[in-house]
Amino acid sequence: MSYRQDIDSLLKQALRDRDSSRVSTLRMLLSSLQYKEIEKKQELNQDEFHSLIKTLIKQRAESIELFKKGQRSDLVEKEEKELEILKGFVPAQMPDDELSAEVDAAVTELKATSMKEMGRVMKFLMEKLGSRVDGKVLNEMVRKRLSA
């Protein structure tokens, strides 16, 4: 079953349950997905789908922060609901200890010794680990490892 079919079935269930926030979030997700597929002129693979979801999650997190500064609690609540629904589509993140071991192995394999090689290490790890890691967390770990 593809991710599009999963979203469609969740949308149908949300419509039956009359869950308006879930319906609007899933419709927004389908719209974003369709837009990305038109842009790319083909169906997204699993990693591209997860990348899209992460982008949407990041947008919601930024919106929540801005709405909190603007004291718009009604909008904060709406964005938080959307954020929780979207998080259900992202695969479980790799535990920090495993990620740390992957970073050490990559630095050793690439023989990276300075911060100048951070981009090369990041690219290698992102290709290898894909959507199982958060880019920010990975960036911090690689930075610590190379600066030590």
Image (spheres, rainbow, N blue to C red):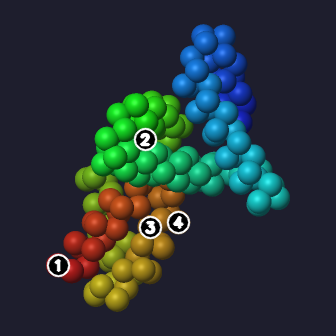
Q: Is residue 85 left or right of residue 46?
A: left
* Above or below for 12 versus 28: above
Q: Residue 127 — which label?
A: 4
CB under 8 Å between discs 3 and 4? yes
**Toward the viewer: 41 or 121?**
41
Q: Residue at x 42, y 80 (%)?
A: 119
Q: Which kind of residue does numbered mark 2 sit on?
A: Ala
Q: Residue furthest left?
A: 148
Quadrant of residue 19 in the image? top right
* Above or below for 135 versus 1: below
**Toward the viewer: 73 or 125?**
73
Q: Which kind of residue does numbered mark 1 sit on?
A: Ala
* Above or below for 81 versus 113: above
CB under 8 Å between discs 4 and 1? no
Residue at label 3?
125
Q: Quadrant of the N terminus?
A: top right
Around disc 2, counting alpha carbons within 10 Å, would you say few (fewer than 14), some (14 to 19), or many (20 or more)? Answer: few
Q: Is residue 44 left or right of residue 78?
A: right
Around disc 1, counting alpha carbons within 10 Å, would you say few (fewer than 14), some (14 to 19), or many (20 or more)? Answer: few
Q: Residue 92 — which label?
A: 2
